[in-house]
Image (cartoon, rainbow, N blue to C red):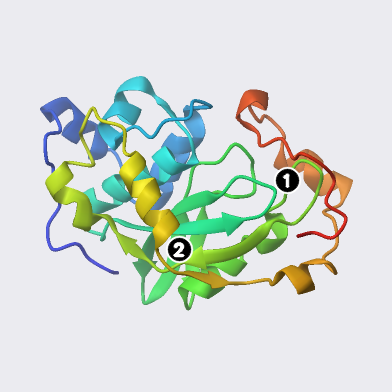
Amino acid sequence: MIKSLSPNPQNFSKEDLKFFKKFKKPYDIQLFLNSIKYNSEYITNSPRIVLKRQTANCFEGALFAAAALRMLNYKPLIVDFFCVNDDDHVIAVFKQNNLFGAVAKSNTTTLRFREPVYRSVRELVMSYFDFYFNTLGEKSLRGYSNLVDLARFDKLNWMTTNEDLEYIGDYLCKIKHHTIVTNKFARSLNYADKDLLDVCFAGSIEEGLYKPKRKNKDHL
């Protein structure tokens, strides 16, 4: 387990902290994220606001999961996914027995929890590759960032602030991303089949889905 130096409650209320104590393991956090509504607003609320409003988009979900994992003595780690012709994605990462797993909020069914069975961050990310596609079935994942420890933003009270956390998104856009698929190789990628498309987007909030501008035959 990658452990946090200490859980940082920042400005959570006693009621908030009591709620976090309900999470006994990472999968409990995932079940909570699955149960709340997907937030289609273009905003990044803090984990405290997510808890209050019971709604989250994928970025907010990753931040919430990182905060909740921190309460379980994990480091608050996230990884950013870079995509083409699709929404980017962010996951919260945890480590058990020297293996990586993930907790994530998604408007699809296939980009959420991963068991801690992956030997590296790249291996973890690649478990999402064949399930990461837009509504046209184009496989869109192209790269991923290094692990980001959100403790670097503690002075800004990222877990409990009322302010938009857009600055964390800006930071993710600036840091190095590792390429998975080049534009040239992407031309040979196959489309996801219809059955998988149906499963992936079952129950999705329509207004929260990325709308591809065109069918990208070259998969660029």
Q: Is residue 177 above or below residue 77?
A: below
Q: Give the farthest residue toward the top.
A: 53
Left or right: residue 136 compared with residue 100: right
Mark seen at residue 175: none
For residue 218, what is the image quadrant?
bottom right
Of badges 1 and 2, nearer the viewer stands 1
Tell me the residue at 17%/41% (across/down).
157
Which residue is labeled 1 in the image? 134
Q: Position of residue 32 (x, y in %)?
A: 42, 35
Kind of residue at disc 2? Gly
The quadrant in which the C terminus is found is: bottom right
Q: In this view, does 49 lie above or below 94?
A: above
- Which is nearer the eye, 100 or 21? 100
Left or right: residue 167 compared with residue 89: left
The quadrant in which the N terminus is found is: bottom left
Q: Is residue 94 visible?
A: yes
Q: In this view, does 45 lie above or below 132?
A: above
- Which is nearer the eye, 102 or 133? 133
Q: Mark 2 falls on what kind of element?
A: strand
Q: Position of residue 190 (x, y in %)?
A: 85, 62
Which residue is labeled 2 in the image? 101
